[in-house]
Structures are given as structure tokens and as C-alpha cells.
Amino acid sequence: MNEFQAYLILGFDHITDVNGYDHILFIVALCAVYQMTDWKRILVLVTAFTVGHSITLALATMQLFTYRSDVIEFLIPVTIFITAFGNLAHKFPKSEIEPDTRPPRLRYVMALLFGLIHGLGFSNFLRSMLGREQSIVQPLLAFNIGLELGQLIIVGLLVGAAFAANRLLGVPRRDWNLILSGATAGIALTLIQKTCIF
């Protein structure tokens, strides 16, 4: 296995590892209001998050940006809670099969900004793995691609579950969102309490 493949797998394993479930929770909160017919919006949303965390992942890993780890560990669950709590006020189309037509510009901006915070969280892990590397450009790229592949699988599973709940089991989109976002917000509150820096 070459270096690129090793860091690709490392990134994939990092985002899909259940022990690092805070990043998975954020993706769940980000996509909880959507279903398969909203795939274009999901793609833009995930891309905004990717752009955000790619920027700070690169800057922090190359040590061009310094920060306090405890602050980032506290802010990550805060981003999860804000996103999940915001979902509770989401207004859905009247038809269960109709795509959402409301302009989600605020969600795109939030995904980008919160991605910046999550990128700093990713960099803690990656920087500890890069100590012996002469050049970090290729490992950084491979790790980031691995993160995105894992993220896309999580999103795919999530919208697949939403489809099954809505179309096959008859669970209304609003109820699915309330259950998923409510549970995510509750877990985020627990994480906030554990990582509180005040």
C-alpha cells in the first residue's frame, strides 16, 4: 500500500469511526430535513461543509493557524446543537414526495462556517500522524478525500433511511425530522456539558 492509499484509508476510517461520532452527528443534523429528491441541495450543502473544513484542516495541519484544542472540542458539539435545534423549526412542503423549494442559503453559510470549526477538529488527529512525513501535501489531500468518501457514504445511508421511513413505513417527513434532530440535539447537549470550558 502506498502513502496516498494509506492516508486515504486513514481519512475514511476517521470520519466513519463510531468513537468519533461527533462529526457523524453533525452530518446527521445537516441532512436530517432532506430526502432523496433534495439531492442537489444536499450536494451543495455537503460541498459547503467540505470547503470549510478543507481550509482549516490544511491551515492547521501546516501549522499556519494556531488554536486551543479545548475550545474546538467545545465548539464542535455547539455546531451540532445549533444545526439540530434549527431543524426543529423547518417548514416542509405539503406533499410528502415534493422536494423542498425554500431557499436554504442560511444553511449553506452555516455549513461553510461550521465546517471551518470541524476542520480544526480533524487537524488534531492528522497532525499527530504526520510527524515523520517530509511533505504533507499528498497525505493532506489523501486524508481529505478519504474524509469526503466516508462523509458521502454517511449521507447516502441517511437519505436512504429517510426514504425507507417516509415512503415504506409512512413516517411523515416532519416526524422523521423531529425524532432525528431531537435525538441529535440531546446528544449534542451532553457533549457540550462534557467539554464545557467555562
Image: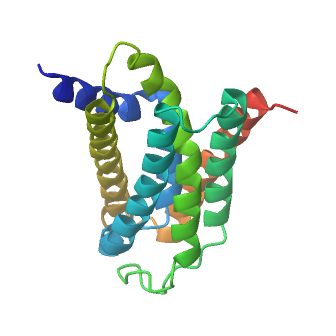
Residue sticking out furthest to the left: 1
User: Relative to the observer, which residue lies in front, 171 or 117?
Assistant: 117
Residue sticking out furthest to the top: 132
Q: Is residue 76 above or below residue 129?
A: below
Q: Position of residue 58 (x, y in %)?
A: 44, 41
Q: Is residue 19 above or below residue 95?
A: above
User: Relative to the observer, which residue lies in front, 123 or 31?
Assistant: 123
Which residue does the image show at 55% across and 35% down from the upper left? 121
Q: Is the C terminus in the top left, top right, bottom left or bottom right quadrant?
A: top right
Q: Position of residue 83 (x, y in %)?
A: 62, 58
Q: Position of residue 53 (x, y in %)?
A: 47, 48
Q: Is residue 53 above or below residue 162?
A: above
User: Relative to the observer, which residue lies in front, 98 or 16?
Assistant: 16
Which residue does the image show at 65% across and 41% down from the upper left? 77
Q: Is residue 35 visible?
A: no
Which residue does the image show at 82% across and 31% down from the upper left? 197
Q: Is residue 151 visible?
A: yes
Locate residue 118: give its quadrant: top right
Residue sticking out furthest to the right: 198
Q: Is the N terminus in the top left, top right, bottom left or bottom right quadrant?
A: top left
Which residue does the image show at 60% across and 73% down from the upper left? 90
Q: Position of residue 91 (x, y in %)?
A: 58, 79
